[in-house]
Amino acid sequence: MATLIHLLGGPETFISRLDFFHTSGLADIGNEPVFLTVFQYHYAGRPALSAARAHAYIPSSFNASTSGLPGNDDSGAMGAFTVFAMMGLFPNPGQNVYLIIPPFFEAVSITHPVTNKTATIRNVNFDADYRRIYIQSARLNGESYSKNWIGHEFFTEGWTLELTLGEVESDWGTAVEDLPPSLGRA
């Protein structure tokens, strides 16, 4: 991703192109290849924009209405996308990377079936109207955490991730060292 962002002209151009893709009608959230594009802002140092996209797509396209499941569920792909996005962790295929956004709930806990350890994500300042969807700061097992992603160990070790939320984008997860790993480098 770092190489792609560089070749496209840098983070701002990459973000501009992602924005165009999502706002022009080109993106079809009912088609699996679009899933990752919702979260690619993380790689350009703007995880808050991923949160904004997910918090726009989920209620508008994935809901309890008769048309609340876009496209074709294709062996559970739509359901899996919805569950992971609402949990606040999007798995990047082929990597030990889950991209972090605020869950759609005050707290989410998952017990690992093998280790029997429970991983928890907790939103501080959660509001059910989703005005506070931007991570201001994070703590992992009580320690400050600035990376905008986390590995699978979160689940197997039963860690606790606490996200403090606000109504405006912050600089959390935006530093180069906080970005997800990339096979290529700019």
Image (cartoon, grey):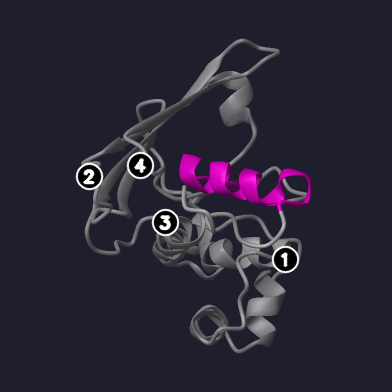
Q: Which range of residues does the magenta coloring cover?
A: 73-92
Kindly identify which residue carries mark 4. Answer: 138
Mark 1 or 4: in front is: 1
Numbered marks: total? 4
Distance from Cα at disc 3 to Cα at disc 2 = 15 Å
Residue situated in front as seen by the camera: 125 or 180: 125
Q: Amino acid at mark 2?
A: Asp
Distance from Cα at disc 1 to Cα at disc 4 = 29 Å
Kindly identify which residue carries mark 3. Answer: 59
Q: Residue at x 42, y 56 (%)?
A: 59
Label 3 or label 4, whichever comes before in sequence order: 3
Residue situated in front as seen by the camera: 10 or 31: 31
Q: Residue at x 63, y 72 (%)?
A: 28
Residue 79 magenta-highlighted: yes
Count neighbours of disc 4 (C-alpha within 10 A) and say few if under 14, some if 14 to 19, many if 20 or more: many
Q: Quadrant of the N terminus?
A: bottom right
Location of residue 36 by image quarter: bottom right
Regarding mark 4 in the picture, which secondary structure is present there?
strand
Label 1 or label 4, whichever comes before in sequence order: 1
Regarding mark 1 in the picture, which secondary structure is present there?
helix
Kindly identify which residue carries mark 1. Answer: 33
Distance from Cα at disc 3 to Cα at disc 1 = 20 Å
